[in-house]
Image: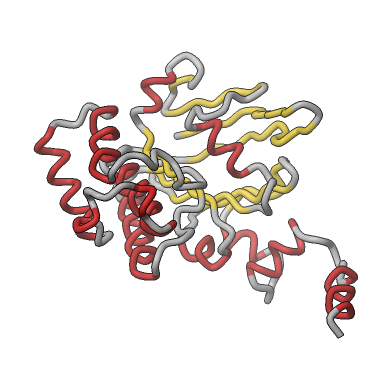
């Protein structure tokens, strides 16, 4: 279980996250929704220790993140919001780096790597450098690295971005299977159909504040007959404001 209590992040005079409190239980797929800049990546990067919150606490399986940072990191596989990292390495070198960080033995690593590179059609490209890959190929490389040690908690920031339909489908199936084993999947997305299809629970953020936390079904029950897209835009989008769209259309007439 992951608990966030009064999590706040301030950059200069900008508050990116405001007193966020959430509980993410084991065995569920938990989704973050929100516009760009809503605080999704700030929350995720705080949990994985990429950034330090200004205030508040994060507890993972009873361990306080600040005082048990390494133990918590070993529980997490993380896919960042951009795959443009370690570009000088080949895919194999990147996976070796991840395996070493998680202290995987060679037999375990090779078995798992064979499974993942087959699934994501990456075996033939394993000795090529990441800087020669397309965005989608880099995304697959980082995904394989995150899933390689089969950690208890998967934290995936926009994981389907750039993936082909087959890879996206396969990842969704893996996310479901991971949660069914009693483990945890946390991901952010802008694709509402994906959130509706996968999430047991979701959080909607707007300008750094939590505006909804609960199941998709519970949310839709509050707005009978409306789609998740309509409900989301009603909560997080411009309220009854068609003027910008009208102005744009008029400028092209």
The correct choice, above or below, for 123 with respect to 6 in the image is below
64 lies above or below 16: above
Dividing the image into 4 quarters, which one contains the N terminus? top left
Q: Nearer the viewer, residue 247 or 46?
A: 247
Judged from this view, the residue extending furthest toward the top is: 67
Residue visible at 36% across and 21% down in the picture? 71
Q: Does residue 13 sit above or below 95 in this rendering?
A: above
Q: In the image, residue 195 lies at what x, y percent?
A: 53, 60
Left or right: residue 47 compared with residue 86: right
Dividing the picture into quarters, in which one does residue 51 lie? top right
18 relative to 193 in the view: left or right: right
As drawn, which residue projects farthest toward the bottom?
A: 253
Total marks drawn?
0
Going by the image, does 206 lie left or right of 59?
Answer: right
The quarter of the picture where the C terminus appears is: bottom right
Residue closest to the far left: 107
- In the rendered image, residue 120, in percent from the top left (x then y), is placed at 28, 59
Of 159 and 63, nearer the camera is 159
Name the residue rendered at 69%, 46% in the picture.
37
Q: Image quadrant of residue 15?
A: top right
Q: How is the image coloured?
A: secondary structure
Task: Please tell me which residue is depicted at 13% across the width and 46% down the height of the picture.
Answer: 111
Image coordinates of residue 16 in percent, x first then y, are: 71, 36
The one of 66 and 12 positioned closer to us in this rendering: 12
x, y percentage for residue 40? 61, 44
What residue is rendered at 39% in x and 70% in y?
165
Q: Is residue 244 above or below residue 110?
A: below
């Amino acid at each position: 279980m992951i608990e966030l209590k009064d999590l706040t992040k301030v950059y200069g005079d900008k508050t990116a996250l405001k007193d966020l409190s959430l509980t993410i239980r084991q065995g569920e797929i938990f989704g973050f929704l929100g516009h760009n800049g809503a605080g999704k990546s700030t929350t995720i990067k705080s949990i994985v220790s990429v950034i330090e919150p200004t205030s508040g606490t994060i507890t993972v399986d009873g361990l306080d993140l600040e005082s048990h940072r390494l133990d918590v990191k070993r529980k997490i596989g993380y896919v960042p919001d951009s795959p443009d990292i370690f570009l000088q390495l080949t895919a194999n070198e990147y996976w070796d780096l991840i395996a070493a960080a998680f202290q995987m033995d060679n037999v375990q690593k090779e078995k798992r790597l064979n499974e993942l590179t087959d699934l994501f059609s990456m075996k033939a490209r394993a000795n090529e450098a990441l800087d020669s890959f397309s965005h989608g190929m880099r995304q697959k490389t980082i995904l394989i690295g995150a899933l390689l040690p089969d950690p208890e908690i998967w934290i995936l920031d926009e994981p389907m971005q750039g993936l082909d339909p087959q890879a996206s489908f396969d990842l969704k199936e893996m996310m479901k299977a991971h949660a069914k084993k009693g483990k945890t999947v946390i991901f952010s997305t802008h694709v509402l159909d994906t959130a509706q299809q996968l999430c047991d629970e979701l959080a909607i953020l707007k300008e750094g504040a939590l505006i909804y936390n609960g199941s998709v079904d519970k949310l839709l029950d509050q707005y009978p007959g409306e789609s998740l897209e309509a409900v989301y835009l009603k909560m997080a989008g411009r309220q009854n404001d068609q003027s910008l769209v009208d102005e744009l259309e008029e400028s092209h007439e």
